[in-house]
Image (cartoon, rainbow, N blue to C red):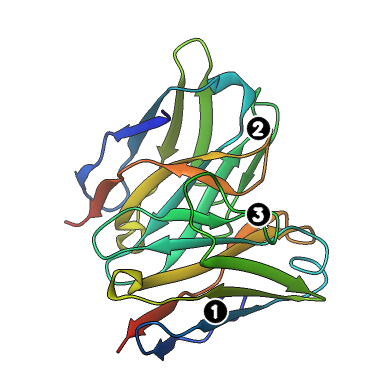
Amino acid sequence: QVQLVESGGGVVQPGRSLRLSCAGAGFTFSSYGMHWVRQAPGKGLDWVAVISYDGSYRYYGDSVKGRFTISRDNSENRVYLEMNSLRAEDTAVYYCAKSRGLVMAAADNWGQGTLVTVSS
Amino acid sequence: QSVLTQPPSVSAAPGQKVTISCSGSSSNIGNNYVSWYQQLPGTAPKLLIYDNNKRPSGIPDRFSGSRSGTSGTLGITGLHTGDEADYYCGTWDSSLNIWVFGEGTKLTVL
């Protein structure tokens, strides 16, 4: 079965950087787009970014554009989220999710999430 | 404020039916597939409906989806307390080139 495991969360000071990783298993990783979605404490889902199956297309939410970068390594079955210039409002649980399609499509499998806390 | 509008909360009695609406525009729901997600307390979201009305394997037929114009609807029949959760709609917005989620609807089974 599909498994997605996020890692790399933690406490970071405002203005600093953090890199999240998501390992995929149980499916042909290189055939599907991958999303990052976040959820601030007590709030709704906030889409962050998506990357196409081959990494050639990347799209970002307005609140992270220019600060976050999504990438993938299909040889390692991993997707990454590089987060720079972090702000308090970036505090959230970050989920990676598999797309049903090559790029943007419904997220049909989700990881358990990793918590990022931006605080001094 | 999201480009997709959902009611903040809905409620119904056990065994009854409930519908949750998701209102958008021609740049999102009007021209792209709608999906629906269930998030039980303390857990990751789970896909319930994709491509407007299709159910992934393992999702019971008590859950249904539809789309009409620029709105999508999630229906749940035979409610039980285990259905108490937050429900989100989602779709691609072709004008903004972003994925969008609704703000979520909290379902209470009284």
- Residue on which the image places disc 1: B1
- Residue on which the image places disc 3: B54
Q: Answer with left or right where residue B10 lies relative to residue B100.
A: left
Q: Answer with left or right where residue A62 lies relative to residue A44.
A: right
A89 to A104, vertically: above or below: below
Secondary element under disc 2, as helix, strand or loop, is loop
- Residue on which the image places disc 2: A52
A108 to B26, vertically: above or below: above
Specify few, some or many for label 1: CA neighbours under 10 Å numbering under 14, 14-19, or 20 or more: few
What chain letter is assigned to the residue under label 1?
B
Looking at the image, is mark 1 or mark 2 nearer the viewer?
Answer: 2
Q: Amino acid at mark 1?
A: Gln
Q: Position of residue B17 (x, y in %)?
A: 49, 83
Give a yes or no on whether discs 2 and 3 share a subunit. Answer: no
Can you say which quadrant of the picture contains the C terminus of chain B? Answer: bottom left
For the residues labelled 2 and 3, the Cα–Cα distance comes to 23 Å
